[in-house]
Image (spheres, rainbow, N blue to C red):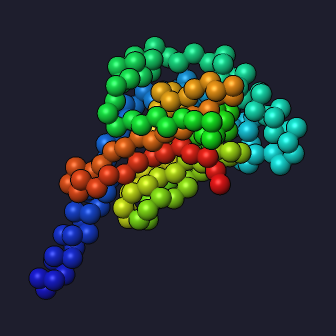
Amino acid sequence: MYLRILLTFSLLLHRVLSDTLIQLPSPITHDPAIVELFSKVYSIAGPSAPTDADLLNQTRTRILALLSDFSLPEQVTAVVAASSSDQRLYCETSWSSPAYADVASAISQLYHRAGQECNSNYGCEGMQAWGSAEIGICGPFGYSWDCKDVGGMAFWISAHCMADLGTTRVGGRYLFDRWWTGDPADVRIYRRS
């Protein structure tokens, strides 16, 4: 009897705590303009990168044109500017980082998967790839988010970490933890292997 009560309580506690995580400010993930932007990127990118090199480059060019015409809404710009010294954000952009158009396409795939779970099982797991980019989650077993929120975290990284190195590239990670475990986890953008 006591064992069943303890098990029931443990499961309920796990359910409550697993739904509690540190999230980015909502303007990043839920702003209608950003949702619309990634909907447009998805309509150009499609569900996977073209295998033909010329078509892939044409797709990247169209995505970059769309992104260059987009202006962040004021409330999002304010959030990005206010967090420029965010201690949990690590920019790791280099020549080997994925192309920005590919990162934006992978982010659009995650936004397109809104309502689906992206979760980790010990270690690092890729959640979405497109072209040269992959977006993954690293952390202990049981971390679970709406895929759209993972896309929002990746957008947060790209808003801070993109660099023009001849080709605009993005690489980095956003570190966070759950307050009751202290176990770190992160969303990261890296070159697809």
Residue 17 spot, x, y in % from top left: 26, 56
Looking at the picture, tell me which residue is in the foreground, 156 or 92. 92
Looking at the picture, tell me which residue is in the foreground, 192 or 67. 192
The relative height of residue 40 versus residue 129 in the rendered view (above or below) is above
The relative height of residue 30 versus residue 185 in the rendered view (above or below) is above
Residue 103 spot, x, y in % from top left: 62, 38
Can residue 104 be seen in the rendering of this structure?
no
Residue 157 spot, x, y in % from top left: 48, 34
Question: Could you tell me which residue is drawn at 42 percent across and 37 percent down?
Answer: 90
User: What is the count of numbered marks?
Assistant: 0
Question: Could you tell me which residue is drawn at 40 percent across and 31 percent down?
Answer: 26
The relative height of residue 51 versus residue 75 in the rendered view (above or below) is below
Can residue 15 be seen in the rendering of this structure?
yes
Question: Could you tell me which residue is drawn at 53 percent across and 18 percent down?
Answer: 72
Viewport quadrant of the N terminus: bottom left
Residue 94 quadrant: top right
Residue placed furthest toward the bottom: 1
Question: Could you tell me which residue is drawn at 38 percent across and 23 percent down?
Answer: 84
Residue 142 spot, x, y in % from top left: 37, 62
Left or right: residue 2 versus residue 93 is left
The relative height of residue 29 versus residue 177 in the rendered view (above or below) is above
Left or right: residue 123 versus residue 190 is left
Viewport quadrant of the C terminus: bottom right
Left or right: residue 13 versus residue 21 is left
Residue placed furthest toward the left: 2
